[in-house]
Amino acid sequence: MKKEKIAVAYSGGLDTSVIVKWLQEKYDADVITVTGDLGQQKELVGVAEKAYKTGAKKVYIQDLKKEFVEEYIFPALKAGALYEHIYPMATALGRPLLAKALVEVARREKCTAVAHGCTGKGNDQVRFEVTVMALAPELKVLAPLRTWEFKSREDEIAYCEKHGIPVSATKKNPYSIDENIWGTAIECGILEDPMVEPPQDAYQRTVSPEDAPDKATYVTIEFKEGVPVGLNGKKMDSVSIIEKLNEIAGANGVGRMDLVENRLVGIKSREVYEAPAAVTLHFAHRELERLTLDKEVFHYKVKLADDYATIIYNGLWFSPLKQALDGFINVTQKNVTGLVKVRMYKGNLTVGGRTSPYSLYDTKLATYTVEDTFDHSASEGFIKIYGLGLKTFYRVNGSKGRKAVKLLRRKK
Ligand code: ARG
């Protein structure tokens, strides 16, 4: 029989390290690790060495930051996609890209299967596997965490010690953390009680609003067709803009969220998120849309944002519906170009100003001064007709109408 060759989505953490060894033992497989750099704060140095030490035959480490930002984050930003109106979906957006990278390596290396380190009760397993099903239906997917014998972290550590797998020296974090350039998700430990306020040590990349500067910080963000292209008057590349905003907004206590959310698999989970750049960019982008989109498109888009977010959250990034919605969203973004000045102060964002060459705000129509050009007399006829249906309804069913109905009943 041909030897199994498995590509593993590898983070270098405990679970995926155990997976690398476990697959070799269990399937007598050659294991190739694939690690994607999505701009996680945790350094990726040492990850390759660790993978080789754990027995990997070949190691891939790929810088996916630019692709992540431009092909995954920006479409979600343009759509205004926030799951359950809050979560900017750093994790949910990262999974399809990691799965795609994994599939590409698996094809190149002629692997017989791919494997991931997601648990059996989360969304990530769904996102990974559905993406593989879409992009490489011929590939087998293995999810060792759903089937293996280890019951606890201690079991896994014991397995590592037995096999000489380097367990990182860092002391056990009380939380489970997933992070990338678009944000950090923090769960487990004391956070599992939704009545407990997240302790300060849960936060990884934002200062508490109380400790933020006493003076407001202003940032001017330049957008072109719905995506950020510059900060404070300077053109910048997409990745640098997000990195810089994470820094500035994080230092102002912006971007903390505490959410009891509905997982796809039917569980409610309590998640703490930090996404300073994501929260700032969604805020600024929406402000620019208020200025540049016509009323109908703006309202329609708000409704669509919810659906678009759910598609991403539920792992359907590569679905035809998502693609079709992108067509609509991209058309709406043609005029979302301009500047938004954002004021950050102790965790809060307010608008310091906005401007666009495509602004639909017309001072001559809006003003209450002598400059006013609005035809006030036209409102009279408009209101007469606009309110006609309501007027008719109350003529029939209003106080007079109701009395008439009562009289009729009595006569019977
Ligand atoms: N609940 C969030 C989501 O489903 C975050 C998941 C975090 N994942 C993790 N492996 N810790 O997108």
Image (cartoon, helix red, strand yellow):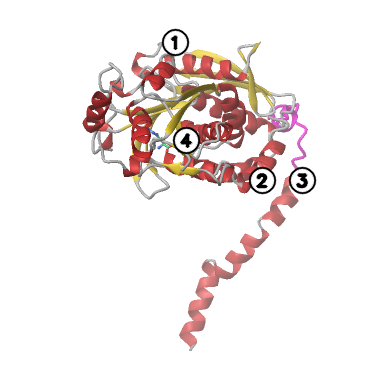
**x, y (%) of residue 43?**
43, 15
Tell me how far mark 1 sits from mark 3, CA to CA.
47 Å
Q: Nearer the viewer, mark 4 or mark 2?
A: 4
Report the predominant secondary structure element of the magenta stretch.
loop
Tell me how far mark 4 sits from mark 2, CA to CA.
36 Å
Label 4: how many Cα within 10 Å (few below 14, some 14–19, many 20+):
many
Q: Residue at x 33, y 30 (%)?
A: 18
Q: Nearer the viewer, mark 1 or mark 2?
A: 2
> Does the beta carbon at disc 3 come under 8 Å from ligand 1?
no
Q: Are marks 4 and 3 in contact (CB under 8 Å)?
A: no
Q: Is residue 20 above or below residue 126?
A: above
Mark 3, residue position: 378
Q: Residue at x 47, y 22 (%)?
A: 276
Tell me how far mark 4 sits from mark 1, CA to CA.
57 Å
Tell me how far mark 1 sits from mark 2, CA to CA.
44 Å
SS class, disc 3: helix
Q: Amino acid at mark 3?
A: Ala
Image position of 128 (left or right of 164): right
Magenta segment includes 362: yes
- Residue furthest toward the front? 1
Magenta stretch: give its range: 361-378
Quarter containing ligand 1? Answer: top left
Mark 2, residue position: 324
